């Protein structure tokens, strides 16, 4: 939430600033699917009552709703994490031909360093791929301003606009001046099939227009204040030994590492202002391109014949820091000095800055919460020695020791298709031991079509839908089968049972993972070969949902019954510490869910409470 910093300025993180910028720009429709680091944009937008806001069932739908809204005349924004753009790529690549009516902005929040993602793809390429402009803020103030600018560019150039952030921009707070909401004049809907119906004949006419548009945008890039040359005061504007081309969060690192150096800051990440950059390159001895992830700008510069130092010295992987920027420059200049005898980077310039943590932080491996219903599932799957095609959500932690019960995890929804393929590839006795595991939100996001594939092609997969009634991993957002909307209001709940049945599945059961024996029995029954898929809905609400909270109570432990067999440790519950070979119940974490008691063969855990025990 916003923290007051000064009279008109408030501290916002980048996502809140984007939401504010969208609201001030008169956005009327906002859509998205949760995904770190983008999630808080929709959460913040949901607090503005004058905007229609939805959690869409997936990113493709989110973009399609936003496209419909912009064609209908409302400024619209669709928000997602970087991999979400892959899901939305189909409409994206074609709306690029169609253009817009009212402004359309797609926010992609990228995650260099993979703080919580399965890859760290650089989504600036989508701009080049789809011939769309990409704006990239360097702090929260710019996040707000660039959101407003993106709507202007969208309408001026009849184009969807990509607004790209990265985790540090999305989640770091800096001051933002708030403005009023200004709604642009109406843009009435105009029926225009040549523009909006992408039949091959129409698309063929539209494609060259995207190239023309790019030409105009390139001209715009040369003069827009989104790009700026910073030449520190008091320094000779004519020449400098080194200059930097940078943008996004890397701009902050360059400024910190080399406060005296001239910097060409790119706010419009694509297309680039080749002439202005060539001019800048001519005024510095060495031009450095500092960008996280891919050599995107570097490649563009080199394509223009502009010499620059980039990924030879700056990593292509993970995040940069000010000290990594200094090190890269030092490395290059040291090497050059070796060749030419030129002076080295000053020692204090190359020194380690304060931006990298110096003291080692304790390692905190991700772990399922105490009482998490997913734990029981993976305990049973491992016990039965099944091959598990997994998916993305909290339950992916079932892949880690000691549960170690997941064989594959690719992207959202991939578990079901993966299972179909495995079933078709493996010898029958192994194929029958394959199960797919998917969360409820993920099933709705991108699992349904693959289940239909299994029904249609009579592939007898076994599918466990882990229904904890929320999108837990990203912070408990609603989804169509959860029963509440983006504003937290009650909403119609799509029945997973009805949905699965409607896909044509005839073998369907529901089980509560709180009863581990029943769960094991239900999994075994699903494994009995049949015609077509068997689906098991494993239903128990996430322990962190308010309605799941229990009175603080810890499982009882009768130490005289403990045989030190270690079975309880195999479920990997953080509420069970170790006292030698015996468990030590951490009362402040334990919620007495019964899982450790279910796996304890001697009855020590969950046994008689102290006051009930025989004192002899
Ligand atoms: C295309 C894409 N969009 C969003 C995400 C972020 N994300 C990962 S899993 C997930 C959903 C998790 O919910 P669910 O399947 O219900 O499992 P739970 O975490 O509740 O166990 C989300 C939103 C992602 N990894 N990929």
Image (tube, rainbow, N blue to C red):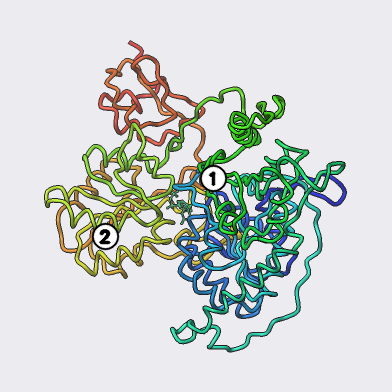
Q: Residues within 10 Å of mark 1 (few under 14, many from 20)?
A: many
Q: Quadrant of the C terminus?
A: top left
Residue appearing at x 51%, y 33% in the figure: 552
Residue appearing at x 76%, y 79% in the figure: 185
Q: Residue furthest front?
A: 340
- Is residue 456 placed above or below 341 in the rendered structure? below
CB atoms of marks 1 and 2 within 8 Å: no
Left or right: 313 as drawn, with respect to 174:
left
Q: Residues within 10 Å of mark 2 (few under 14, many from 20)?
A: some
The residue wearing badge 2 is 508
Most foreground residue, 399 or 379: 399
- Is residue 202 placed above or below 128 in the rendered structure? below
Left or right: 567 as drawn, with respect to 227:
left
- In the structure shown, which secondary structural element does the residue marked by tag 1 occupy? loop
Most foreground residue, 439 or 139: 139
Q: CA distance from mark 1 to mark 2?
A: 41 Å
Instruction: Tell me residue 164's x, y (percent).
Output: 61, 56
Q: Nearer the viewer, mark 1 or mark 2?
A: 1
Instruction: Tell me residue 348's x, y (percent).
Output: 72, 25
The residue wearing badge 1 is 112
- In the structure shown, which secondary structural element does the residue marked by tag 2 occupy? strand
Instruction: Tell me residue 453's x, y (percent).
Output: 27, 66
């Amino acid at each position: 939430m916003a923290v007051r910093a000064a009279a008109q300025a408030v501290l916002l993180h980048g996502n809140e600033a984007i939401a504010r910028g969208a609201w001030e720009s008169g956005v009327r429709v906002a859509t998205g699917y949760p995904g770190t680091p983008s999630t808080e944009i929709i959460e913040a937008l949901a607090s503005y009552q004058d905007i229609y806001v939805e959690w869409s069932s997936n990113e493709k739908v989110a973009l399609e709703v936003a496209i419909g809204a912009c064609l209908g005349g409302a400024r619209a924004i669709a928000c997602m994490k970087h991999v979400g753009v892959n899901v939305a790529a189909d409409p994206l690549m074609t709306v690029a031909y169609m253009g817009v009516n009212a402004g359309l902005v797609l926010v992609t929040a990228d995650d260099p360093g993979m703080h919580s993602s399965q890859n760290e793809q650089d989504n600036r390429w989508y701009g080049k791929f789809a011939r769309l402009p990409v704006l990239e803020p360097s702090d929260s103030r710019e996040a707000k301003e660039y959101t407003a600018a993106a709507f202007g560019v969208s309408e001026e150039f009849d184009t969807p606009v990509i607004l790209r952030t990265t985790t540090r921009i999305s989640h770091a707070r800096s001051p933002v001046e708030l403005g009023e909401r200004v709604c642009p004049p109406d843009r009435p809907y105009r029926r225009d099939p040549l523009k909006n119906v992408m039949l091959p004949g129409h698309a063929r006419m539209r494609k060259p227009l995207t190239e023309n548009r790019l030409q105009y945008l390139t001209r715009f890039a040369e003069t827009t204040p989104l790009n700026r040359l910073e030449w520190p005061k008091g320094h000779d504007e004519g020449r400098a030994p080194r200059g930097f081309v940078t943008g996004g969060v890397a701009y902050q690192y360059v400024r910190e590492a080399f406060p005296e150096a001239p910097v060409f800051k790119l706010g419009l990440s694509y297309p680039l202002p080749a002439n202005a950059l060539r001019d800048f390159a001519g005024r510095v001895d060495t031009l450095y391109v500092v960008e996280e992830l891919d050599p995107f700008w570097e490649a563009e510069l080199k394509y223009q014949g502009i010499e620059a130092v980039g990924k030879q010295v700056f990593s292509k992987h993970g995040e940069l820091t000010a000290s990594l920027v200094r090190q890269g420059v030092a490395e290059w200049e040291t090497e050059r000095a070796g060749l030419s005898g030129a002076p080295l980077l000053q020692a204090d310039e190359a020194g380690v800055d304060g931006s990298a943590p110096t003291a080692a932080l304790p390692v905190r491996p991700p772990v399922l919460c105490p009482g998490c219903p997913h734990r029981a599932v993976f305990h049973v799957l491992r016990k039965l020695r099944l091959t598990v095609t997994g998916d993305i959500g909290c339950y992916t932690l079932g892949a880690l020791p000691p549960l170690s019960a997941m064989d594959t995890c690719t992207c959202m929804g991939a578990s079901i298709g993966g299972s179909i393929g495995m079933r078709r590839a493996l010898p029958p006795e192994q194929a029958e031991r394959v199960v797919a595991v998917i969360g409820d939100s993920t099933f709705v996001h991108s699992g349904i079509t693959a289940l239909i594939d299994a029904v249609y092609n009579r592939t007898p997969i076994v599918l466990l839908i882990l229904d904890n009634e929320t999108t837990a991993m990203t912070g408990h957002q609603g989804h169509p089968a959860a029963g509440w909307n983006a504003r937290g209001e009650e909403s119609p709940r799509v029945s997973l049972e009805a949905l699965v049945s409607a896909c044509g599945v005839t073998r369907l059961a529901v089980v509560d993972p709180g009863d581990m024996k029943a769960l094991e029995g239900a999994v075994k029954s699903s494994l009995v070969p049949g015609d077509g898929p068997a689906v098991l809905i494993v239903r128990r609400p996430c322990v962190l949902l308010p309605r799941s909270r229990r009175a603080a109570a810890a499982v009882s432990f009768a130490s005289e019954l403990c045989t030190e067999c270690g079975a309880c440790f195999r479920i990997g519950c953080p509420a069970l510490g170790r006292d030698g070979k015996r468990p030590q119940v951490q009362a402040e974490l334990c919620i007495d869910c019964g899982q450790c008691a279910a796996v304890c063969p001697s009855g020590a855990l969950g046994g008689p409470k102290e006051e009930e025990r025989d004192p002899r």
